[in-house]
Image (cartoon, grey):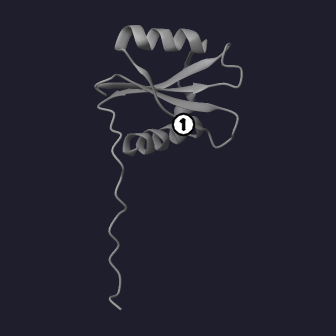
Amino acid sequence: MKGLTLALASLAILIGGPAQAATLVCTTYASVAKQLAARHQETVVARGLAADGGHLIEVFASPDRATFTIVMVMPDAAKKTCMLSEGMMWDENPISPPVQEGPTP
């Protein structure tokens, strides 16, 4: 889930920040899934709803986790799914909470 946390944090910046000016590559969900499977053997490994509740965010990753792709699925996925980011070395290990030092009781 560490990779998912980092990816979703990056995604929040992509959706709401200056990167919004970048051109998104969008097509049908079936086309995106087929292309990622054929080119990188990637399948869905994580998903969650965006903060607005109207979009589904999915992470596709290769079996060895060497490559990954983050996509945004619109409510009508048959018509529009957009590739937001791609990367390498997807990590699904849980994140340990940070150690907080405080006063000793």
Percent position (x, y) of residue 42?
A: 40, 19
The quarter of the rendered structure image containing the C terminus is bottom left
Instruction: Answer with left or right where residue 77 lies relative to residue 22.
Output: right
Question: Residue at position x 57%, y 11% from top?
Answer: 30
Residues 86 and 46: in front is 46
**Is residue 97 placed above or below 10 in the rendered structure?**
below
Judging from the image, what secondary structure is the residue with disc 1 in? Answer: helix
Residues 97 and 85: in front is 97
Instruction: Answer with left or right where residue 62 lies relative to residue 70.
Output: left
* Within-10-Å neighbours for mark 1: few <14, some 14–19, many 20+: few
Percent position (x, y) of residue 102?
A: 35, 81
Q: Amino acid at mark 1?
A: Pro
**Is residue 56 placed above or below 93 in the rendered structure?**
above
Q: Quadrant of residue 54?
A: top right
Q: Which residue is mark 1?
A: 18
Percent position (x, y) of residue 28?
A: 61, 12
Percent position (x, y) of residue 65?
A: 31, 28
Instruction: Answer with left or right where residue 104 lies relative to residue 30.
Output: left
Q: Quadrant of residue 79?
A: top right
Q: Quadrant of residue 100?
A: bottom left
